């Protein structure tokens, strides 16, 4: 199957899913990165401008991220708003610190992702809509997403696309090359880069997921990330499941 054909499947899926579930619109967090840019382009083709609402949610973020999101929204001609969550984020941090609960950097970064997703779900409920997630296959496999943060969504339209396919698909749907090829970053803190945190490149991840040869170091790292993140991909356990499975 060609990438173009698969994009048509995703577009038709989103169109039908909204109608079948009697919802009125899709809600999407727009970061300016390639993943959310592609989902925005797909969403626009699936349901049109009037049923897609996108939001940039900076939290002490780089202005470039907001500018890239705004640029994409103009190019695609989609609904776009900026909701600065810096103040509520810092108020939450102060509540913890007042109770002598000290959060480390990773926990603070994940709190940002969860605050953003809580915002999207609040808007979705208010508009009778569904939240679109932006995780790709590489991120899902390695667990490179925040549990109940960017990993929480009603639908994951590009979860079966490796990173190269995401870039290629973005270019096919008229996402500017500078956004499609932007250095991947979750934008959770200044200087943050996905590959630095993963300790493996997306090219290596893509190759591994396609069954190609990668270095032993990359292979071990990818399999380790997959193993320790398994809890993120499973449904929430219940006691009866453990009894049924004889655990």
Image (cartoon, rainbow, N blue to C red):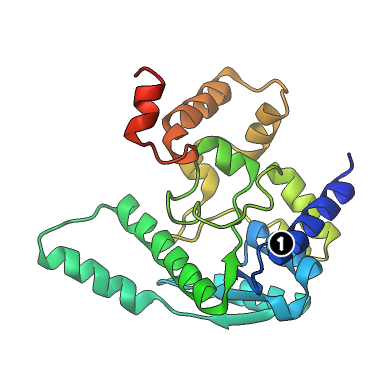
Above or below: residue 131 compared with residue 231? below
Q: Which residue is mark 1?
A: 20
Q: Position of residue 45 (x, y in %)?
A: 81, 67
Task: Give the residue displayed 56% in from the left and 70% down from the top.
Answer: 65
Q: Is residue 8 left or right of residue 54?
A: right
Q: Residue at x 76, y 70 (%)?
A: 47
* Residue 243 vertical placement versus 44 (above, below): above
- Foreground residue among 222 and 235: 235
Label 1: state its secondary structure.
helix
Q: Please tell me in which quadrant of the rendered image residue 242 appears.
A: top left
Q: Quadrant of the N terminus?
A: top right
User: With respect to residue 209, does 76 lie above or below?
Assistant: below
Left or right: residue 230 versus residue 33 is left
Q: Position of residue 104 (x, y in %)?
A: 26, 52
Q: Position of residue 89 (x, y in %)?
A: 32, 71
- What is the quadrant of the C terminus in the image? top left
Whether residue 100 sits left or right of residue 71 in the image: it is left
Q: Is residue 101 left or right of residue 185?
A: left
Picture residue at 50% right of the left edge, 36% below the top: 199
Residue 5 in view here? yes
């Amino acid at each position: 199957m060609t990438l173009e054909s698969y994009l048509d499947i995703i577009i038709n899926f989103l169109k039908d899913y909204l109608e079948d579930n009697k919802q009125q619109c899709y809600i999407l967090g727009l970061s300016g990165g390639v993943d959310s840019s592609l989902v925005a382009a797909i969403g626009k083709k699936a349901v049109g401008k009037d049923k897609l609402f996108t939001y940039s949610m900076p939290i002490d973020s780089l202005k470039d991220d907001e500018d890239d999101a705004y640029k994409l929204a103009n190019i695609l001609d989609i609904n776009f708003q900026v909701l600065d969550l810096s103040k509520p984020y810092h108020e939450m941090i102060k509540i913890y610190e007042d109770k002598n609960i000290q959060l480390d950097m990773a926990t603070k970064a994940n709190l940002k992702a969860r605050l953003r997703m809580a915002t999207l779900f609040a808007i979705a409920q208010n508009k009778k809509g569904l939240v679109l997630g932006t995780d790709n296959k590489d991120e899902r496999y390695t667990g490179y997403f925040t549990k109940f943060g960017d990993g929480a969504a009603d639908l994951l339209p590009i979860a079966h696309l490796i990173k190269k396919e995401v870039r290629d698909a973005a270019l096919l749907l008229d996402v500017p090359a500078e956004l499609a090829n932007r250095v991947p970053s979750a934008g959770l803190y200044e200087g943050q880069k996905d590959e630095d945190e993963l300790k493996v490149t997306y090219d290596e991840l893509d190759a591994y997921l396609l069954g190609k040869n990668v270095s032993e170091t990359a292979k071990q790292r990818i399999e380790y990330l997959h193993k320790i993140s398994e809890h993120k991909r499973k449904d929430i356990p219940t006691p009866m499941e453990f009894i049924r499975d004889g655990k």
